[in-house]
Structures are given as C-alpha cells and as structure tokens.
Image (spheres, grey):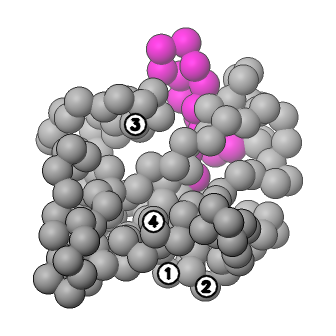
C-alpha cells in the first residue's frame, strides 16, 4: 500500500476510506506524469490503483463534489473530456485485468440519510459518500456539458443506473 502526499481533502478522505476497509491499493504520485509514445504530451495521472478480489483491478480517478446531503436526484458527475481520454490511454497501457473508473466522492454538508447513499463515512469531521462508475459505462452515457470548459457528464437517470458503491466493484 502506498501513502502519497495528498493535497486535496477528497483524495485524503478516499485514501482513508481504502485503508479503513483494508482494500489493497497503490496511490499514484500526481507530481509525476507519464509520457505516452503515441502522444508526445504528458498523460494526466489518475489517483489510485485499487486491487479487486472478484473482478478487474481499478484505475481510479477521484472526483470530489460538494453535495447538500439531502437529495440524490441530480448528483454532480461531470468530468473533463481530457479525463476520459487519459483514462482510455491508461486502460490501454495497463492492459487486460485493469479497468478505468471514476470514483465520485461527495462531501456532504450534513450526515446524509441512510437511504441516500449506501457508502458513507466520516473523515476529519466531514461526511463523504462514494459512488463509482466504470469508464466504459461513463462513456456509453456521457453527454457534453460545456463545450467552453470541455466537460461531459451523465444525465441523472443514467447515472443512477450505472453508478454503484465502490465495494460492489471489489
């Protein structure tokens, strides 16, 4: 298991979550960027390699989002087009047995009700909920959110269908 220096509370909270559940992982050092032969530009790092007992190992890019903790109708799930492209390249680099995924970590202003999220935890006096979606599911449902900011997201109904608690993938 790796313990990397994490600048953002979302990354710190996610690493705490993995450690508390004794999930094997390696934290990726975000200060180093890999070069891809096919693309001379640097390749944006993802955050964690998380090892699964029952399925493919996950290449996880943590996406922190603030949430009121009250309603799950429209959970924020946007990512950049570059996030999607880089995760596709990482899947190619790692090959069989590894799958890209986005882990949406929702920082809830208050402790969310049990029915809202399956996986909730507290870290440094903050409440978090975790939902994950594989890259393939994300790409199958993504729509352009903002051409100007080059962001995409999944419509709420589709996100509710394809996102699952992270433990379901492991």
Which percent across, then down, holds residue 19? 29, 33
Give the label, 1 or 4, closer to the camera: 4
Q: In this figure, which residue is indicated by the disc labeled 3?
A: 11
The residue sitting at 16% across, 70% down in the picture is 35
The residue sitting at 18% across, 33% down in the picture is 3
- Inter-mark Cα distance, 2 to 4: 15 Å
**Mark 1 or 3 closer to N-term?**
3
**Mark 1 or 4 closer to N-term?**
4
- Determine whether label 2 and label 1 are within 8 Å by CB: yes
97 to the left or right of 124:
left
**Mark 2 or 3 closer to N-term?**
3
Task: Give me the disc on residue 136.
Answer: 1
Give the label, 2 or 4, closer to the camera: 4
- Element at label 2: helix
Magenta stretch in the rendered image: 117-131
Q: Which residue is situated farthest in the top direction here?
A: 125
Work out whether 66 lies above or below 111: below
* Quarter of the figure with the N terminus: top left
Q: In this figure, which residue is indicated by the disc labeled 2?
A: 140
Task: Give me the disc on residue 42.
Answer: none
Task: Give me the disc on residue 83.
Answer: 4
């Amino acid at each position: 298991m790796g313990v990397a220096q994490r600048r953002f509370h979302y990354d710190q909270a996610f690493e705490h979550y993995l450690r508390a559940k004794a999930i094997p992982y390696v934290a990726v050092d975000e200060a180093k960027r890999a070069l891809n032969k096919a693309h001379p530009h640097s390749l944006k790092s993802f955050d964690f390699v998380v090892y699964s007992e029952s399925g493919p190992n996950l290449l996880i890019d943590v996406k922190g989002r603030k949430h009121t903790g009250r309603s799950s109708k429209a959970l924020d799930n946007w990512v950049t087009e570059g996030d999607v492209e880089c995760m596709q390249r990482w899947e190619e680099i790692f090959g069989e047995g590894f799958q890209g995924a986005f882990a949406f970590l929702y920082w809830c202003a208050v402790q969310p009700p049990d029915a809202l999220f399956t996986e909730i935890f507290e870290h440094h006096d903050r409440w978090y909920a975790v939902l994950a979606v594989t890259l393939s599911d994300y790409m199958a449902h993504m729509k352009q959110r903002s051409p100007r900011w080059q962001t995409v997201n999944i419509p709420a109904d589709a996100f509710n269908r394809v996102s699952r608690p992270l433990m379901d993938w492991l």
